Image: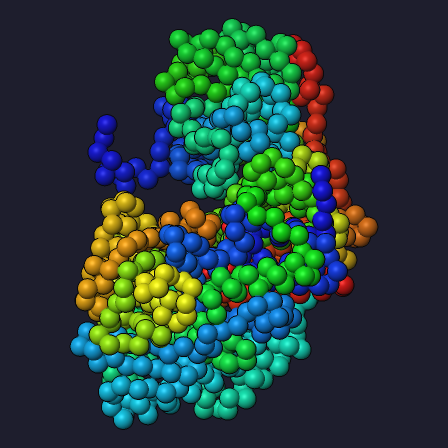
Amino acid sequence: MPSFDAIVIGGGTNGLACATRLAQAGQRVLVIEGRDKLGGSTAETDPWPGYRSPCLSHLLTHLDPRVETQMKLADHGLSFVDRNIPSTALALDGNHLVLTGAAGDTISGLISDADRTAWQGLRKRLMGFAGALAPFRAMTPPRLAKESGNQYLKLAQLGLGLRRLGRDEFREFLRLALINIADVLEDDLADDRLRGLVAFDTVLGAWMGPRSPNSLFLYLNRLSGEISGKRGATALPRSGMGSVATAMIQSAKTAGVELKSGAMVERIIVENDRATGVALASGEEISATTVISAINPKTTFLDLVGPRHIDTGFANRTRNIRSRGGAAKLHLALKGTPDFRGANLRSRLVIAPSIRSVEDAFNAVKYGEVPTRPVMEIILPSAFEAGHAPDGHHVLSAIVQFAPHEPKDGKESARNAMLENTLSVLEDHAPGIRALIEHSDFLMPYDIEDRYGMAGGNWHHGELAVEQMLFLRPFPAVAQYSTPIAGLWLAGAGNHPGGGVSGAPGWNAAERILSRGRS
Amino acid sequence: MTDPRLHFKTPLRQTPFHSRVAEANVLNKWAAWGGYTTALELSDGEMEYSAIRNSASLYDLCPMVKYRISGADAGAYLNRLTIRNAAILAVGSVHYTAWCDDEGKLLDDGTLFRWADTEYMLCCQERHLPWLLDTAAGFDVAVAEITEEIAALSLQGPCSASVLNAAGFDVKALKPFRMARFAFDGGELTVSRTGFTGDLGYELWIAPDHAVSLWDKLMEAGAPWGIRPIGTHALDTARIEAGFIVANADFIPAHQALREDRVRSPFEMALDWMIDWDKGHFNGRRALVAERNGSTSKWALVGLDIDSNVSTEGSIIYHDKKREVGHITAATWSPATKRNIAIAQLLRPYHDQKSDNLWVEVYALRELQYAKLMLRAKVTPRPFFNPARRRATPPGNY
Ligand SMILES: Cc1cc2nc3c(=O)[nH]c(=O)nc-3n(C[C@H](O)[C@H](O)[C@H](O)COP(=O)(O)OP(=O)(O)OC[C@H]3O[C@@H](n4cnc5c(N)ncnc54)[C@H](O)[C@@H]3O)c2cc1C
């Protein structure tokens, strides 16, 4: 039985970041990925001859600065088409609104001066809050217990950071922290397109609508991300999202990490209440001093560890991690250039014409139904650079919301209905697009779960919401990356600070493991 | 069937033995127990106690909660649930056991019967179905509450074996904590040599439609030995003498405790002897390992011998008459040992190193006036009463 200092289960961006950090500290690390390709949802596929498309994620908003610099991702080939691609709020009448710069610092298009000014004020305020919250992303969440090894100095600094907003802004922060985004948008803005865009961005990847309690916090979370030191960025990596994974894989290899793909971990071996290795589906067993799970916590405890090694209350708590996926993924191969009523294809195209449109789409999934008018975010990688589709052809990648994770009419028919409704919305905004479709691929949340192992198909491996954040993520007993089983750690998006292609949970976990080893 | 919507008219159910118990209950002292009407005292509490210790007593045990646990993983499941090793319990045997929550705090204690290789019955005071079902996830096991499917009687006392033999059930070879089956009344009777009195005794398990004939059979066969139906009061005296604890009397099950400091671990209830540290993981094990290794147990369960003959039930215990160090959870004048005994919880280390100067504060009601007494208490081993006849096989021919 081969032996390592650490085995990382799951070769997504978090697994790779965690493994690299440990290897950089001198550990012998093995990453085991179940799929043939490393990179998890950030990898790329060649679904049809001549086309390349992202697996799931198609834009970068949260790349952790430690991961970016200490993994030397630029040296390993990561560069950007644009670190801040514009966002176009599509309108049926062609009167689009375009936001450019970090988190839309400039708006072009027909919009009232009052809204322009109001947006500047709101954006500035929210960016301020997000900036104060951002440092939390890079630390182990505190524990509400005595002698729990909290990073008190850092916590104090962060608390101070919030207080430094000034009395009035701090009060505003407290007022807004748990409010819903729809109320704030309706207070401050009048333009439906702008409201719709921000509402959409807020709930992207979430299982909540803009009117759900504390949805605003998710917007702060979005704005707290950064790329190369730029907060609120929406970056498109050169030659596709897969290049993020590729750069991470290169970095891991350089650090000496061993990578094994096409190997499903079936079981975490626990002996004398200690994780001592993993058993693969092939029957092979590999041992290690530390086992790190960079897949979701539900599968980790309920399936890989199994109920025999955990307490009943703990198993209940794990089962109750809310992890409903609401995002579906559409990939289209197009034999021509679609026309979104003149919109710039070298931008992020968002179909979310109003708050109401987003909320209506969410309402449907609450009851296991398919929304008639889904809202979506569209990218045409082939519009930005060559190499994604044959000449004159395009590949379209869309995140479509909301899709029921447990459709009441069955999975097949929900998928068909969802695809049909999605295409019909697309056709409305880009007349003729359906006739251009050469191939299509559509993934519902349950398909995403089957293919990528995300519990419920949820973007974050467990819903990101105030009650599952920070020291509550995924739940208090395992919120510091450690678990009740000695030698077993968590490092995936299900842990603080949550999902997105960031590497942050993986990096934080590695830091925690290393500091525990030192202490 | 009566209309189920009329359930409110009978908030308490009657056990399958109710007609017979009611006949015997001339004092008409009833109490609710687990949703059933049960008798506290039938005709003479002292004579009822005396039947337990000197002849044979019959007690309606139906309200005890029973669960059937069956399936290929039944043993593994019970090993996860309980602190003792259920997998090594022999078929046809019974053991006393307990189970904890994640924090290693007691949820209940009870008796576990192994009916077959893959079938057990768990018998306890409180209801636990949600917890038992949650614990079953991932195991090939079926858990069902069968309280109403089985009528249970407790036949206890030095003459209990003779009564059974006279009734046609040969239990001479039956050892303590073993079970035997007999054909009866066209059905099957299971007899286990178990009980809650610390005396020679048996528990009888049968389908409810044979319950009354079993009662009648035993009363008839036992008449020469003076068999007597008893109520809960008499049993309680006997169980205190035997040093047994009861959920919600001597400890609060962790799922029911409202106050954070009321929960107790097996160490704190002197049940740690049952923990099997080597059987693999079980609920609460990590917390219990930490408690053991860190010696962090706060409480200890002890037996007390108290001066005078005044009942000390519920009293507070002081060290040096000043510092509050514990309380009494069960107390009685023990007729068998002629001592004033009690079961108590004491803060550590007042249960051993500092146990020399303990006092019980009692307010004794004397003709409308309370007299405040400080009574000397001495820590004594449990059981207070432990006769050899309890264990002898074959049982003595009384
Ligand atoms: C539809 C959709 C669109 C998204 N779009 C974006 C986006 O545009 N931008 C963005 O930043 N984020 C996006 N996300 C979120 C993002 O993809 C995830 O939050 C992020 O990938 C999580 O990274 P991870 O490393 O923790 O897990 P993953 O990327 O999910 O990687 C986990 C890996 O573990 C492997 N695995 C699972 N089980 C086992 C096992 N038993 N043995 C071995 N290997 C196993 C899986 O195959 C997978 O490769 C999207 C999510 C969804 C669902």
Splitting the image into 4 quarters, where does residue B389 fall?
top right
Q: Nearer the viewer, residue A104 or B154?
A: A104
Mark count = 0
Residue A391 placement, left or right of B395? left
Residue furthest to the front: A391
For the rendered model, the colour scheme is: rainbow
Splitting the image into 4 quarters, where does residue B338 fall?
top right
Residue A95 placement, left or right of B24? left
Residue A95 placement, left or right of B206? left
> Residue visible at 36% across and 30% down?
B14
> Residue visible at 24% across and 46% down?
A413
Q: Check the picture and name the quadrant holding the N terminus of chain B.
A: top left
In the image, residue B227 sits, relative to residue B342, either above or below, namely above
> Residue visible at 45% across and 13% down?
B188
Q: Nearer the viewer, residue B230 or B272?
A: B272
Can residue B155 be seen from the camera position used here?
no
Q: Position of residue B349 (x, y in %)?
A: 77, 52
Q: Position of residue A517 (x, y in %)?
A: 74, 60
Can residue B180 be seen from the camera position used here?
yes
Q: Position of residue A319 (x, y in %)?
A: 47, 49
> Residue visible at 82% across and 50% down?
B353
Q: Check the picture and name the quadrant holding the C terminus of chain B.
A: top right
